[in-house]
Image: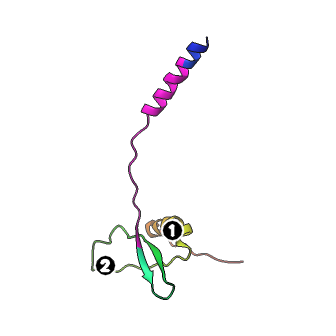
């Protein structure tokens, strides 16, 4: 009985390992390194370019995100969502 269970588990594991879909890389930005003479350190900058960026005549607003290593993906998601909206979002306070 142990042999049958072991063979069944091995077959299930084989199916699980071979049934995965090959993944594609999702590239949402670039990482560049600049050297700071004042701090004597290298700093990394994360940059996300809009989809229409290859058109040099078009101007784009710039969003600077402090703590970009933590909020880079959230900022990109928010910008993409708001740029695709067909309505205006107006925040208000009580």
Quick one: SS at disc 2? loop
**Measured along the vertical axis of the image, is residue 58 above or below residue 51?**
below
Front residue (pair 29, 55): 29
Give the residue at mark 1: 72
Give the residue at mark 2: 58
**Measured along the vertical axis of the image, is residue 81 above or below residue 24?**
below
**Measured along the vertical axis of the image, is residue 39 above or below residue 22?**
below
User: Percent from the top left, x then y, of residue 70?
Assistant: 56, 67
- Image coloring type: rainbow
Name which residue lies at 52% across and 76% down.
Answer: 65
Quadrant that contains the N terminus: top right
Q: Does the magenta stretch include residue 24?
A: yes
Left or right side of 94 for 7: left
The answer for how far apart the CA atoms under marks 1 and 2 are is 23 Å
Left or right side of 70 for 47: left
User: Percent from the top left, x then y, of residue 14?
Assistant: 46, 27
Crowding at mark 1 (Cα within 10 Å: few <14, some 14-19, many 20+): some
User: Percent from the top left, x then y, of residue 5?
Assistant: 58, 17
The stretch of residues the image draws in magenta is: 7-32
Q: Is residue 66 magenta?
A: no
Crowding at mark 2 (Cα within 10 Å: few <14, some 14-19, many 20+): few
């Amino acid at each position: 009985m142990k042999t049958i269970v072991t063979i069944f588990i091995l077959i299930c594991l084989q199916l699980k390992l071979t049934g995965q879909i090959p993944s594609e890389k999702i590239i949402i930005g670039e990482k560049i390194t600049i050297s700071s003479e004042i701090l004597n350190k290298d700093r990394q900058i994360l940059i996300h370019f809009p989809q229409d960026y290859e058109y040099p005549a078009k101007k784009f607003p710039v969003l600077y995100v402090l703590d970009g290593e933590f909020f880079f993906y959230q900022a990109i998601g928010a910008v993409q969502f708001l740029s695709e909206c067909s309505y205006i979002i107006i925040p208000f306070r009580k």
